Amino acid sequence: MGIREYKEADFAAIVDIYAASKLDELRFEPQKFKLTPLNLDPQRLASFHESDVVVYEEERVSAYLGTHLNHIRSIFVSPTYRGKGIGKQLLEHAIAHAKAEPSLEIVDEFVSSFDGIPVVVNTMKRQSS
C-alpha cells in the first residue's frame, strides 16, 4: 500500500509507534524519562490533531509524518521498520505534496524540554545490529 492519508482508525497504531520511538530522542540524557503516551499528553496530542498526517502502511501502519503550514512537525518510524527507507519516502512525499516550500530544522544537537525538564537532544543515528 505505501503512503496514504491518516484515518481515525489508525490512531491506536500511531500511539504505539510514538510510544516505541519518542524516548529515542532522549537516549543520551543522563537522567531517565518516563514516557507520557501521546493520547495522554495534551500539548503533543493537540499538535498531532492540528497537523496533516500521512501514514506508511504495508502489513500494518509502521510510520507517520505530520505537517502543519508546511513545517514538518513529526516523523516517527516504528523501530522494527527502521533502515528500510520509510522515513525517506515520507519526507519525499511531504516535499512533493507541499503547497509551499516545506521546512524541517535539522541540527546535530539542540536544547529542548521534555515534560518541563531541559534536555540536550542529539541527531538520531541508526545503530548497527
Image (tube, helix red, strand yellow):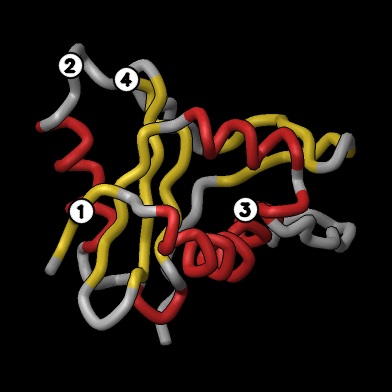
82 or 5: nearer the viewer: 5
Pick the front one: 120 or 85? 85
Residue located 19% across and 23% down the image:
98
The quarter in which the C terminus is drawn is: bottom left
- Amino acid type, residue under disc 1 in the picture: Arg
Q: CA distance from mark 1 to mark 2?
A: 17 Å
Measure how far apart labels 1 and 4 are at the Cα level: 17 Å
In this view, the mark in front (1 or 4): 1
Q: Which residue is depicted at the point 44% across and 31% down?
A: 51
- Viewed as shown, does residue 43 lie left or right of 20? right
Residue 70 circle label:
4
Q: Which residue is mark 2?
A: 99
* Nearer the camera: disc 1 or disc 2: 1
Residue at the image point whose x is 32% and y is 20% from the top: 70
Among the two numbered marks 4 and 2 on one chain, the one whose residue lies closer to the N terminus = 4
Q: Amino acid at mark 3?
A: Glu
Disc 3 target residue: 25
User: How many residues crowd mark 4 within 10 Å: few (<14), some (14–19), many (20+)?
Assistant: some
Position of 27 with respect to 80 (left or right) is right
Callouts 3 and 2 close, C-beta under 8 Å:
no
Q: Which residue is mark 1?
A: 4
Measure the C-alpha gap from mark 4 to mark 2: 7 Å
**Circle 4 — which element?**
loop
The answer for how far apart the CA atoms under marks 1 and 3 are is 26 Å
Decide which of tag 1 and tag 2 comes sooner along the chain. Answer: 1
